[in-house]
Image (tube, helix red, strand yellow):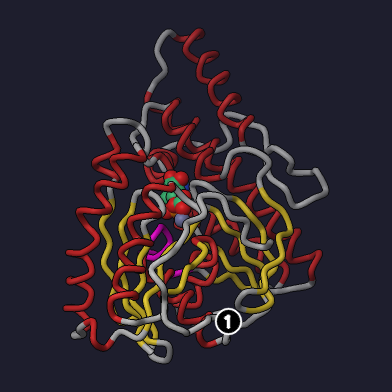
Amino acid sequence: MIILGFESSCDETGVAVVHTQRGLLAHALHSQVAMHEDYGGVVPELASRDHVRRVLPLTREVLGEAGLTLDEVGAVAYTAGPGLAGALLVGASVARAIAWTRDLPAIPIHHLEGHLLSPLLADPRPDFPFIALLVSGGHTQLMRVDGVGQYTLLGETLDDAAGEAFDKTAKLLGLGYPGGPALARLAEQGDPDRIELPRPKLHSGDLDFSFSGLKTAVMTRQRQMQAATGEITEAQRADLAAATQAAIVDVLVAKSLRALKETGLRRLVVAGGVGANLRLRERLARGLRGLKAQAYFPPLALCTDNGAMIAFAAAMRVQAGLVDLTTADAGFTVRPRWPLSA
Ligand code: KG4
Ligand code: ZN
């Protein structure tokens, strides 16, 4: 079966077609980063309007690229939450409209399920069960995944998400939005050990995270440096970026290793935007070698939000027999807040 999938939960419009047996056929993405940059963050109303503008041209693009027409599509999938309500409604209403007019099933997908199954789009793909570290702008969670639809939450952030910690610190350092990639770039020129920053909850004995104190620590260090020398130098900014990245990565790695040890599992899947971070990948690889465990990542282009992971999660659910394939009615809802393991 060919599934057409839509992602519009935040600031990326993603559309993709996936074949339940043959995998990903085509995907297209429009990032709104440039539009939100001037505001230092996502403006929900602008995001929704831009999704409206982009979604149909992107749909034509992916169908064209895959050499398909809507006649060959067997089901339509969309991100039903969590995310920005207005943004979610765009993908949901387009998907539901296509499904209804063409008498197809419509499959609502949890955004985080999309992320956590996305490493299965790469080669080699992990077998179940595995531990998933979900690290995005809105979420930081450790999950035990026993199969499609079988998710147990092991730990999560009590306040800011890891991506949020990257973004907020980047803002403090005067870097653009989104801050994660910019902070990671600046960190390459800095020394991660010159400035000491806290590793929140590193030894808390559980699998939860807390990142909100980190930005305060960075702000304090920045003020101290400014007070001492008047102006903070480029080298000092790079050191602060490197120290921040190192602190976030240390905690993510330590808790992931702990989750593997506690469950006895030896496969770790890393998903979500922060999974693109190279230091995180390096440090995890090092830690996992000691445990004889293996890390799995989505293809780099599919680490951040995209339609491929949504269409693919729908395909996995269809194959697992978890989808009601009776055709859709026109009614639907989106869930801006939606726990995955409930
Ligand atoms: O999964 P995602 O695209 O969107 C959400 O669902 O949130 O993740 C976006 C987050 C942002 O916070 C961004 O700064 C972060 O992922 N990010 C990174 C990197 N690339 C993206 N953080 C650290 N290093 C990166 N290379
Ligand atoms: Zn995401």
Q: Between 141 and 281, which is closer to the camera in this rendering? A: 141
The residue where tag 1 is placed is 322
Q: State the count of labels.
A: 1
Q: Which residues are magenta?
A: 298-306
Left or right placement of residue 190 versus residue 146 in this view: left
The vertical placement of 43 against 94, above or below, is above
Residue at x 63% of width, y 68% of height: 268
Left or right placement of residue 320 versus residue 307 in this view: right
Visible in this render: residue 277?
no
Could you say where residue 225 lies in the image, as x and y percent from the top left? 51, 15
Residue at x 64% of width, y 79% of height: 147
- Main secondary structure of the magenta stretch: loop
Visible in this render: residue 115?
yes
The vertical placement of 91 against 308, above or below, is above
Q: Quadrant of residue 134?
A: bottom right
Q: Between 63 and 175, which is closer to the camera in this rendering? A: 63
Q: Secondary structure at mark 1?
A: loop
* Type of amino acid under label 1: Leu
Residue at x 61% of width, y 82% of height: 127
Could you say where residue 202 lies in the image, as x and y percent from the top left? 74, 43
**CB at disc 1 and ligand 2 closer than 8 Å:** no
Residue at x 54% of width, y 59% of height: 282
Q: Quadrant of the C terminus?
A: bottom right
Q: Quadrant of residue 177?
A: top left
Residue 47 magenta-drawn? no
The vertical placement of 36 against 294, above or below, is above
Q: Between 135 and 8, which is closer to the camera in this rendering? A: 8
Could you say where residue 294 lies in the image, as x and y percent from the top left? 62, 73
Q: Quadrant of the N terminus?
A: bottom left
Residue 303 magenta-drawn? yes
Q: Quadrant of residue 203?
A: top right
